[in-house]
Amino acid sequence: MAAMERSRQRGLFARLALVLLAILFLAGVTLTDRLLRHARLDLTEEGAFTLAEDSKRVASSIDEPIVLRFYFSSRIAREIPQVGVYARHVRDLLEEFAAISDGKIELQVFDPEPFTDAEDRADAFGLQGLPVDRTGERVFFGLAGTNSTDDVELIPFFDEARERDLEYDIARIVHSLANPERPAVGLITGLPIAGSPMSQSGRGQNDAWTIYNLLLAAVDVRQIISTATSVPEGIDVVVLVHPKHLTDETLYALDQFVLRGGKLLVFVDPHSEGEAQNVQDPRRGRPPAGFASNLGRLFEAWGIEMPAGELAGDSSLARRVQVPDRSQTRLMAVDYPLWLGIDRRGISRADSISADLSLLNIASPGHFRLLDSAGASVTPLVTTSKDGGTVPVSLLQGPVDPLAVLHAFKPAEEPLVLAARLSGEVESAFPDGPPEPKAKDDGEQAAEGEEPEVDEEARAAWEALKAAHLARSAAPMDVIAVADVDMLADPMWMVASALDGGRTGQAVADNAAFFLNAVENMTGRDDLVSLRSRGSFQRPFTLVDDIRREAESKHRAKEKELLDRLEEALQRLNRLERDPSSEEQVVMTTAQTSSLKTLRADVIRLRRELRDVQHRLRRDVEALTSRLELVNIALVPALVAIFAVVVAYARRARRRTAQGG
C-alpha cells in the first residue's frame, strides 16, 4: 500500500511539474515577446538585418515631430499568412525608428475596417486599397507620414518584392519629412526618361522611367532644354543623360557652371541600345545615323576622352545569352562581353557613392581614356576587370551577332574605366570666351564686306557673359562621368511589380542606387547612401565561372575555325551548283561531279566535327557541374563523418590510457 501511495504521489508531482513547466514556458514567451521584441542577433556578414547607422542617425537627428500612420488590414494576415509575417517585420522596423527618435516620431497603427473613419483617412492620404472580393471590401498595407507643416510622404502599399529596400524606404520618408526643403537639380536629356508629353502633362499614364520617379521623390527636378544658354539660378547640380546635339552656347554654359563650382553628373554612350531599339521599330520610321552622345570638347579640356568608335567589354564579367549558331539549327549559350554584370571586383570601395554597391548591370558601354594633357584628377568609380577589352561600334550597326562580337573582342592591356570622378582645377574649354552671338535672321543678307547684323539684346547678353567669363576654375570641380546610358533603363536593373502596373518593382542590381547616391552626394544630402544597397549581396561563384570559361575557351577557337571552314565550303558548293556553264550542259563533267561530291562530303564532315566539338564542350561543362554537386552534397557530410570517427577514436584511446593507468 505504501509503495502504491508513493507511486501515486510521484505521478501527481510529475503532472504538476508538467503544468508548471507549461505555465513557465508561456510566461517566458510572453515576457520575451514584450521585453526582447527589438532584440536582434544578426549573423550575416553584412549585417543585413540590423538597423544601419545611417538609419539611426536620421531617426535621432529629427528637430520637428513626425507622425507615421501604419495602415494594415488584419484580414490580410488571416488569409495570406506570409504577408502577415512581412507586416510584422514592417511594424517592428517602424517601432525601432520610433524608439531611436527619442519621442520625435509618433507611430500610429490602424486596422481600417470597411466603411470606417480609418478607411476614409487612408483614402484621403492616397494609400492603395486592394479589393479582396465582390462586396467591394478593400485591404490596406501602407504608410502615411506627416510633419508639423503638413507635408505628406507615402508608401501606398508595401510590396514584398521590395523587402530588401524596406529600411531605405522608411528612412527616406523620415528624412524627407525632417528636411522638407529639397535641393534643385537640373536635367538635360536626349531620352524620354521623364515620360511621354501626355504623361508629363498629367493627362496620360505615368510612363516615366522608374529612375526618374525615384529622382523626383528625392530632389526638385527642373528640366533644362538642350539649347539653353545658361544654367538657371538656384541649381547646384546638373544631370546630363545622353546629351545629343548640344549647342556651343549650352556647352559654354556647362563649362562656366563647372568652373564656378557647380556639380555635374553626366551619362554618355557611344551606342545607346535603348535608343537604337526604339527608333528601329518600323512604326517609328527610319533610324537616324547614330545613337551616340559625347561631351568631346568639355572632356578634352578636363583631360579625358571617350573614344567614339569603341565599345568596352569584359570576358569574365560578361552576362550569358542564348543565340542561334551559324547553322541556325540550335541555340547555344555564350558569354556576351558587351553586356556586363560589374561586381565588387570592378566597383570602387574608396568613394561613398559606390562603396556599398554589389552589382551594376551595363550594356554596350564606352570607356574613358586619360589624355596626356590631363587637367583634372581622375578617380575611377567603375572599371572592367583585367579581362576587359574593346569591340568596334560598327558591329552593332544592324542585327547584332553575339558570336561575331565575341570573336572580334580585343583584350586591353589594363582594366578600362567605365565611370570616373573628376576633381581639381581646370582650364575653360572656351579660352576665347563665349561663342559669338548669331546674326539676326530677318531674311536679308548682309552686303559684301559688311558684318551681319546682330540682335542688340543678344549682343548685350554676350557682352555680359564675356565680362563674367572664367578662364580657369574659381572653385574645385566635381564631375562624375559615366560611359553608359542604358544602365538607367528599367529592364537593366529591376523586375517590374504587378501591383501598380509595373511602375515599381524589385531591384536586381544597384544601378538606381549608384545614380541616386551620386545625385545626393553632390547635393550634400548623402545621409541615405549606404541604405540603398543593403540586401543586394551578390555572391557569384567566381571560381566556378572561371573554370567554366576556361573549359569553353579550349573549344571556342576550334569551333570558330570549323564554322569558318563550313561557311566557306557551303559558299563554294552553292557557287558550283549554280554555275551557269553547268546549266547549259545536260550532263555534268566528271571533274564537276567529283568536285561536287568532294564538297558535299566536306560539308558533312565539317558539320560532324562541329557537333563533336560542341558535344565535348557541353560534356566538359556538365562534368564540371557534376563534380561541384558531388563536392557540395557528399564532401561536407563525408568530412563530418571523418571528424566524428576521429573524435570517437581519440576518446576511446583516452579511455584505454586511463584504464591502463
Image: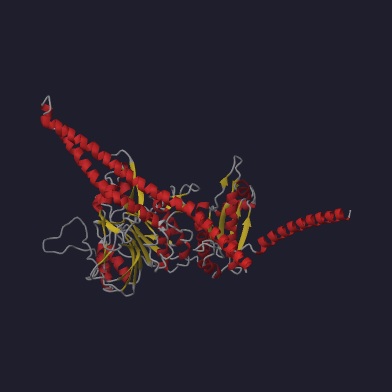
Q: Nearer the viewer, residue 169 or 46?
A: 46
Q: Quadrant of the C terminus?
A: bottom right
* Label tally: 0
- Return the x and y of residue 188 as percentages of the image width and height: 34, 59
Q: Residue at x 39, y 50 (%)?
A: 624
Q: Residue at x 42, y 67 (%)?
A: 352
Considering every residue shown, the one lying at the far front of the view is 660
- Return the x and y of residue 412 as percentages of the image width and height: 26, 60
278 up-or-down from 600: above or below:
below
- Return the x and y of residue 623 as percentages of the image width and height: 39, 48
Coloration mode? secondary structure
Q: Nearer the viewer, residue 35 or 316?
A: 316
Considering every residue shown, the one lying at the far top of the view is 586
Query: Left or right: 221 with respect to 250?
Result: right
Q: Nearer the viewer, residue 171 or 523?
A: 171
Query: Left or right: 98 with respect to 517?
Result: right
Considering every residue shown, the one lying at the far right of the view is 1
The picture quadrant where one finds residue 110 is bottom right
The answer to whether residue 326 shows anywhere in this view is: no
- Return the x and y of residue 641 as percentages of the image width and height: 53, 56
The picture quadrant where one finds residue 255 is bottom left
The answer to whether residue 170 shows anywhere in this view is: yes
Q: Nearer the viewer, residue 193 or 510?
A: 510
